[in-house]
Amino acid sequence: MSKIIATAAIRGAHKYVREAEEKLKEAIAQKGENCKVEYPNTAYYLPIILAFFGLKVQYLKDLWDPLDRAKKLLPPLPSESVWLPYLGPTLDAGIATLVAEEIIESLKYLIGPNPVSGIWLGFADDSILREQGIKLVDGRMPGFAACVGACPTNEEAVKLIRELQEKKILVFIASNTNGKSIAEQLDEEGIQLGWDTYIVPFGKDTSASIYALNFAARSAMTFGGLQPGNLQQAREILLYNKKRVNAFVLALGTVDDEKYATAAGAINFGFPVIADTDIPQILPTGVCTYEHVVSKIPLSDIVAKGIEVRGLKIKVEKLPIPVSYGPAFEGERVRKEHIGVEFGGKYSKAYEYLKMRDMDEVQDGKIEVIGPEIDEIADAGVLPFGIFVEVAGRKMQKEFESILERRFHTFLSEALGVMHIGQRDLMWVRISKDTRKAGFKFKHLGVILHAKLLSEFPAIIDKVQVTLYTKQEDVDKMMPEAQAAYKERDERIGGMKDEDIDIFYSCALCQSYAPDHLCIITPERLGLCGAYSWLDGKAAYEINPAGANQPVAKGETINSKTGEWKGVNELIAAKSHGKLEHFSAYSMIESPMTSCGCFECIVGVVPEANGVMVVQRGYGGMTPAGMTFSTLAGTVGGGLQTPGFIGVGRMYLTSKKFISADGGFLRIVWMPKELKEALAERFKKRAEELGASDFLEKIADETTATTPEELLAFLQKVNHPALTMPSML
Ligand code: SF4
Ligand code: ZN
């Protein structure tokens, strides 16, 4: 154990605790001790303080207790000559530092400067945690790297981050080196930051590192089901992180006292620190799986070293294409000024179409571009495009076509600089200038589809052949066939009624983080994430009979109005581990279906209006229920039955079975404008079926009402049908 590190870390801890105390006094002077202090949209209060001490901080005055405990943990400031033979005091200093940083950062939300500004995102709320944290815990993401500081040059910063992205490692960024942060370097180079691209800039101060660690602490409480409380429980939360959350810290550039102190905090979580500068190493294993601090690692090796030290297992897919490939690139946009070539959307006719063929009709690996290749197209050019994929396999079925085709989006988007939006004849693709310059050809779209279809569906696909059409006449020629196929697929499910079949499908995919939740998917009610229809459930079961989608025999009907069946109830009881007994498919009042966390929309009763509001994920404003989407999501999710609230896939809204036991479609009184616009066509059609053709205009939105009073006034003005329906509750 190096005494320099211990000394620096303890010095840093003292400084942070002092700063936390000053800030707390300042906040109390400004706001009074009874003022609320909180992070946005979390059920975990101040998570680090909750996890370490079991304290639920709500008001400023509640902060004295944790601050006091942090002070008690502070080891005395060692003089340079004191030799600390073991890690203990440094670790205590680390805990004190994290508590102080949590106080400092949470107070910023109250008295400023606002942690959310410019590229900086501040606290990651619980809905982000549910969505992203699970990937860390279940292994879809191998781990996270907390990058602290900056690289000597922007070029090195980009290289480092691309390497992490390619390995699917989530990048958390905090702090700076001499006033510069790696996040700013990336921003200057036009790299898109945010959760979508796996690069998360928390804040420029070193204390913003706390957002990475309180994310980790909440992961343990959410996904590990660990309860905070006493010291022993705090230890378990830390151990969970050591075992399950594979993270490491990359210290970029000089390391000052604050960074040492924060690193000492991270070591408590079992997260080792890798530095590119010459700082003293801490090599003996103990708290961390391997070394605690490894230094003087050149930037070019630093990622590899982090992976090695933390023991991450990384499977990188190497496709024979000239650009990086992986999920971190899926969410990256290609902005207008970076377009190399573009097709589809509103710019040209384009489609993607997958068709099942007989074995002898498909030549595996044949990829053909009919018409001009990318180098024959002018820079930023637009062209028509047809992606035609023929597959064959002994276990392939016609019904799988749409499921396979829908995966094109992910497959293609994961190539760096390829942006794919939409599907079918609505798809829209941009290939960036840089990607084009790197030698990417249209042919490579085929290479990707061929490789991914074979590797992801080995049980059903044996052969894949891809033809890419880039001439108008060829695109036109095939379009009608593709469109006819889309229509036929839709009709197959569109015409199906729940009454017509005896088998539903269950989906347990989300049990990994909502252990008591189960989706029951019927032809008229799709999974709440919107990604699984009944046909998808059926196909998934046939593709993988041991998978998350299982057939459920309805059995005896208990209540045809609310949608309750004996067979379904029995399965629910078993899969919810006895927590639930009933389940009604068509009611949101009487034992409604549970929600995990990935609902496309939340439907909630607005009692004043005798109707329901619908709000979609991504809508940031206020709703008439007095809660935002993310606050609502915190209440509705987690596998609980919450009468009056359900999570749904958006296509369910226009189903004949949409809360049919509670009055149905005409109960909808409010939804955000954006959602109204997106669903306008379907809404109009459904309204007409119900003889209420002007219904869409009667639904309020955020421009007409955000409180129950405003809502009611609007509904009365337009004479909304819900007002005269029987009472909902
Ligand atoms: Fe399956 Fe439901 Fe989760 Fe969608 S939300 S993946 S249907 S369990
Ligand atoms: Zn889910």
Image (spheres, rainbow, N blue to C red):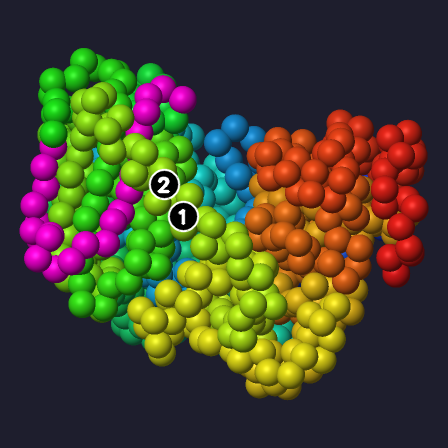
- The crowding category of the residue bearing disc 2, from other C-alpha atoms within 10 Å (few below 14, some 14 to 19, many at least 20), is few
User: Image point 48% across, 63% down: which residue?
Assistant: 534
Numbered mark located on residue 488 in the image: 1
Whether residue 560 sits left or right of residue 163 in the image: it is: right
Q: Is residue 178 above or below residue 241?
A: above
Q: Relative to 697, is 78 on the left or the right?
A: left
> Are dots 1 and 2 in contact, CB under 8 Å?
yes
Q: Which amino acid does label 1 sit on?
A: Glu
Q: Is residue 656 visible?
A: yes
Q: Mark 2 points at which residue?
A: 484
Q: Where is residue 332 in the image (x, y as percent from the top left)?
A: 36, 36
Q: Which residue is drawn at 48% across and 31% down?
A: 119
Q: In the displayed structure, does residue 112 sit left or right of residue 162?
A: right
Task: Indicate whether 605 appears above or below 288.
Answer: above
What segment is highlighted magenta in the picture?
Answer: 346-369
Indicate the secondary structure of the residue bearing disc 2: helix
Where residue 186 sits in the image (x, y, percent)?
34, 31
Residue 55 appears in view: no
- Mark 1 surroundings within 10 Å by alpha-carbon count, few (fewer than 14), some (14 through 19), many (20 or more): few
Query: Residue at point 41% right, 56% down?
Result: 263
Q: What kind of element bears circle 1?
A: helix
Could you tell me which residue is drawn at 58 percent across and 78 percent down? 554
**Quadrant, the N terminus:** bottom left
Viewer-proximal residue among 542 and 249? 542
State the image coordinates of residue 92 (x, y, percent, origin top left).
51, 67
- Judge whether residue 177 is colored magenta: no
Question: Residue 428 location, x and y as percent?
Answer: 35, 30
Give the amino acid type for the residue marked by disc 2 in the picture: Ala
Q: Is residue 355 magenta?
A: yes
